[in-house]
Amino acid sequence: MRGPLGAVIGKYPSSDGNGEVSSGDGIIKHNRKCRDVVFLVIFIAFWVAMIVNSSFGFNQGNPLRLTYGLDYKGNVCGDRHADPNLHELDLRYWLNPNEVYQSGSKDSDVKLANARSICLMDCPIPSEDSLYWVCDYPEGDIRLAVDDWIDRNYDYFADLTPELRNTSLQLQGPCYPVIFPSVNVYWSCQFIARASNVSLRHWKEMGGIEIFEDIIIDKAIHRSINSRSSVFKRYVADVGKSWPVLIVCGGILPVFLSVIWLLLVRHFVAAMPWITVVLFNIVIISVTMFYYLKAGWIGNDAISPIIGESDPYYRVSARELTHLHVAAVIMTAVMIIAVLSSIAIVRRILMATSVLKVAAKVIGEVQALIIFPIVPYAILAIFYMFWFSAALNLFSSGRVVQNDCSNNCCSYDLKVKRVTCDRCCGYSIQYTPHIAAAIIFHLFGCYWATQFFVACSSTIIAGSVASYYWARGEKSLEIPFLPVVSSMKRLMRYSLGSVAVGSLLVSFIEPIRFILGAIRRRLKTSNSTPDSWPGKMAFHTSQGCLRGVSWIMKSVNRNAYIMIAITGKSFFKASEIATELIISNVLRIGKVNVIGDVILFLGKLLVSLVSALFAFLMLDTHKYKSSNHKISSPLFPVLVCWGIGYVVATLFFSVVEMSIDTIILSFCQDSEEHHGTAQFAPPLLMETLDSQNEMQRLTQ
C-alpha cells in the first residue's frame, strides 16, 4: 500500500529524505526527472515513419485518380501533365459500344476496364439528322491540334483516308460512331440503352458492322460506376474537394463556439447546463432532418449521381443514396436516445451547475486557461492539413499498368499507322499490399497523434490548476507567475514520454474494444449464447475481455494525466496512484464527476453537431452540386467536420473538464488527509463546495 498522497501532492520530501522542501521551491516544483524515455523515443521514431510513409504517398499518388477514370493510353482524365494535355477533359467515354455490350454479357470474358475509352469535355449526344463521330486523340498523320479537335466535337472522320474510314466502320477506329445517348454520371458517360434510329440508319447505310442494342449496355457501365471500390474512392475524393468546408466548419467554427461556451460558463454558469441541453436537442434534430432531406425522404433535394443537365425522366440509382438512407435511420435512433437521455438528467442539472461553478472559479483565477487551447489547436490544425493531404495521395497511390487480357479486339494506331491487336487491353491502377499497410499505419498515426496532443493539453491544464489549488495553504507567491507556461515547461522537460505511452495505450485499446464488441455481437443470436461449447467459450471470453478492457480504459484516462502533472511520476505509477485515489473516494466524486461529464459531453456534441449542420448548409450550395467541385454525397465531409469539430471542442472543453477533475481529486485528498477539512482549498472554491448539500454529495 502506498503512503499518504499528501506527502506527494502537498509537501514533497527533500532530496535527502529528511525534511520538507522550503516554500521557495514551490508545491508543484520539486525534484523531477525524465520519465518513460523509451516511449518518447518510440514516439519520435513514429513521427519519422509518418514522414517517410507520407513521402511515399506524395511520390506515388495522384488525387485525380479518385474521381476520374483512365483512357486508352493510361492517362488520368483531367490531368494537365498527360500526353496530350487533358486539362478540362475529365469525362470518361467508352468509344466502342460493342465492347461495352460484351463486358456486360455473362457469356463473354471481356471486362469494361479493357474497353477502349477516351477523355472528353462533355458526353456525346447522337445527331438528329446525321451521324456524329468521336475520334481518337489527333496524332500521327492527323495534323490537328487538340483544341481544334475539341472545337470540332472530337470528329475528324471527314478528313480520314478511305482505309481509315473502312477500319472505323469495323469499329476499329480511329473514329467511332455516336449511336447511344449518354449522360454524365460521376464523370463517366453512361450509355442510355435507347439507340438513335437516325444515327443507326446512317451507320447501316455506310456499311458499318452490326451494333448490339440491349439494356446490358446501360447496366455494364452502371455496375462499374456503382462498385464498392468506386464509391469509396469518390467518398475520399469528396473530402479533398470540400476542403474549404473542412476549414470553416471543422476548424474555425468549433473554435469560435468553444470559446463562446467557455466565456458563458465563466459569466453565466447557472444557465449553461440548461442552455447546453436545450440547444443540443434542437441541433441534433436539425442534423437528422438534413439527413432526411439528402436521402430524399423529405422534400426534393435528394442527392443525384447525374452531373449537369439531363433527361428529367431518366433516373440513375447510386450506393451513396442507400448509404444516406442508412445514416438517416441511425441518426433517428441516436436522436431519440439523446432526447430521452437529456430528459432523464433534468433533475441532475442543479448538481451540474454546482460542478461548473468549480471550473468557473478556477478559470477566473487562471484566466490564461481560456486562450491556452489555441496552442494545441494550432499544432493539430497544421498536422491535420499535412495528414489529409498525405491521405489523399496515399489512397490514390499505385502504378498505372496495362491489363493482361484475352480480348479478341483490334484498333488502329495512328502512330504506327496500322491496325494492331496486341495492345487493345485497357489500363488500371495496380495496388500492392504495402499500400494497404501504409494506409492503415497512416490512419493509426492520425489517431495516436490526436490522442497525444489532447493528452498534452490536458496535462498542462491539470498542472496549472494544481498549482492554483495547492498553493492556497502557502503564500500567494507559490502560484507560478504564469502557471500555464510553467506547466508547459514541466511537461516538455519531464513528461512527454509519459503522455506518449498513455496516448499509445488508448490508441491500441480502442480498436481492440471495437473488435471484441463486434465479435460478441456476431456470437449473440436471439438474446442467447451459442449452443456449441466453442461458441459458448468464445462468447463468454469476449465478454470477459470487454470487461477487462473497460476497466483498463477507466484507469488509462485523464486522471492519470492529472497525477503526472502533479507528481511528475511515470504514466503507470501515476495511473496506479489515480486509480487508488478514485477507488477510495468513489462515493465522494462519483456523482459529481458523472453528471459533470455528461453535461460537458453534451457540450462537445453540441459544438460538433453545429459544425456538421453548417457543413450541410455549405455543401448545399451550387458550387458543390455541379461542375468539377460536385461531391458524390455530403456524408463523408459532414462526418469529417463532425469528428474534427469534436476534437477541437475536446481541446477547449478540457479546460473545464481538467479543472473539475483536478480540483475535485485535490479537494478529496486534502479533506481525507486533514480529517474532512480541506486546508489548501482557496476561498473561491470553498464558497461553492462548503454548502451543506454539496458537502453531503462529496463526502457521503
Image (cartoon, grey):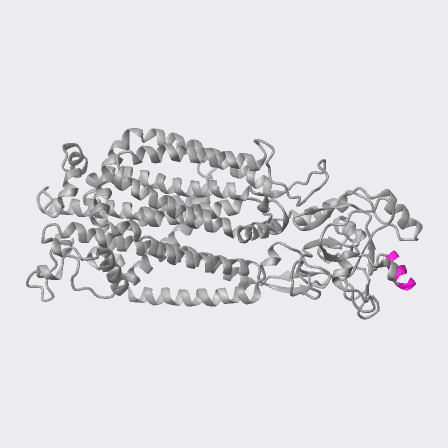
For residue 86, side relative to residue 254 (left or right): right
Residue 505 in view:
no
Q: Nearer the viewer, residue 143 or 189?
A: 143
Q: Position of residue 150 (x, y in %)?
A: 75, 57
Residue in the image at 18% along x and 54% along y = 467
Q: Assign the magenta stretch its main secondary structure.
A: helix
Residue 162: say if magenta. Answer: yes
Residue in the image at 38% along x and 56% along y = 378
Q: Where is residue 97 in the image (x, y as percent from the top left)?
A: 79, 51
Q: Residue furthest left?
A: 18
Question: In the figure, residue 487 lies in which quadrant?
Answer: bottom left
Number of residue marks: 0
Question: In the figure, residue 496 lies in which quadrant?
Answer: bottom left
Q: Nearer the viewer, residue 271 or 336?
A: 271
Q: Where is residue 138 in the image (x, y as percent from the top left)?
A: 78, 64
Q: In this view, does 599 lie above or below 652?
A: above
For residue 27, side relative to residue 596 (left or right): left
Residue 50 in view:
yes
Q: Position of residue 85 (x, y in %)?
A: 69, 64
In magenta, the rendered stretch is 161-170
Q: Which of 88 and 164 is in front in this view?
A: 88
Question: In the figure, residue 326 lies in which quadrant?
Answer: top right
Q: In this view, does 569 lie above or below 302?
A: below
Viewport quadrant of the C terminus: top left
For residue 247, side relative to residue 4 (left or right): right
Residue in the image at 63% along x and 41% along y = 304
Residue 221: say if magenta. Answer: no
For residue 652, side relative to residue 424 (left or right): left
Q: Which of 2 and 646 is in front in this view?
A: 646
